[in-house]
Amino acid sequence: MSVVALGIDVGSTTCKAVAVDGQGCILARRLEPANPRIEQQAERILQELRAETGSAPPVGATGYGRKRVAASRVLTEITCHARGAFALTHRPGVLVDIGGQDTKVIQIGGNGEVLDFTMNDKCAAGTGRFLETILARLAVPLSEAAEYASRASHPILVSSTCTVFAESEVISMVAAGEPLEGIVKGLHTALASRVSSLTRARAGGEIFMSGGVALNAAMVVALSESLGKPVLVMPDAQFVGAIGAALYAMA
């Protein structure tokens, strides 16, 4: 394999790593739940990629745990997600990345540069944790959320803007006999509304979506409906930051 660099994105819920060639194409990858022992997990994953590819190229690191990784370059998530997204799309746009602990909205220019960005990192209600927490309370697997939402005739709206209060509100809905499918759809509608409020000011061009939540079709539909325009899911959606980190490590 003609590996040129490794990139690792140590997030709040998952750890992603890639080995890429000179064009940023993924040649090997790893994804697993984040471990509190970040140093050991990151080193093991990188060693696995080195062993698989038979090389020891430079490493770029990003994500919440980036400063605890032995890397050639350590970069912010905003920087890496913009670089990775542009490498995958080759055009400007707005990237929405809904992570477990924050939501990032990044406006990317014609050369892949960051023109502007905003983040929601103060409350779980605007992040993937919102869905994860309340779906778990409803005993609905995250992998089945889109199917539940697709069967709903209409969303049962969740008005609370706090995850804790929203969980209590949903419990009351269940007790009142509201259909589970409508509640699940309502959860996606509520999250989409919060994310779109961050996005609208920058939504003049194409809108791309990355992160694990981008693999949830119900969330993509809800955000598209809230913004009134299509939201395009990035290829390798969970690895966008890691790809960007690897590309920066080449320099």
Image: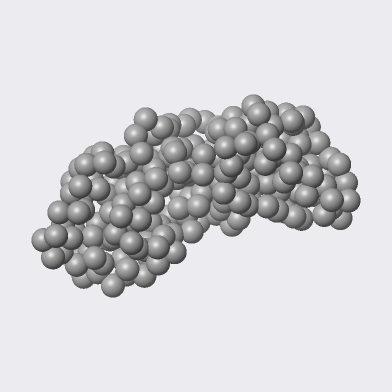
Look at the image and name its color scheme: one colour
Whether residue 51 is visible, yes or no, is: yes
Quarter of the image with the N terminus in it: bottom right
Residue 34 % position (x, y): 57, 44
| Vertical placement of residue 147 versus 45, above or below | below
Q: Is residue 137 left or right of residue 251?
A: left
Quadrant in which residue 71 is drawn: top right
Closest to the observer, 162 or 114: 162
Closest to the observer, 88 or 210: 210
Closest to the observer, 169 or 20: 169
Residue 58 % position (x, y): 81, 36
Quadrant in which residue 60 is drawn: top right
Quarter of the image with the C terminus in it: top right
Residue drawn at 84 percent across, 51 percent down: 51
Residue drawn at 75 percent across, 55 percent down: 28
Q: Residue furthest left?
A: 176
Residue drawn at 79 percent across, 45 percent down: 47
Residue 44 % position (x, y): 74, 44
Residue drawn at 33 percent across, 56 percent down: 135
Residue 76 % position (x, y): 59, 30
- How many numbered marks are there? 0
Q: Is residue 124 left or right of residue 21?
A: left
Whether residue 246 is visible, yes or no, is: no
| Vertical placement of residue 188 versus 151, above or below | above
Q: Is residue 220 left or right of residue 45?
A: left
Q: Residue furthest bottom?
A: 151
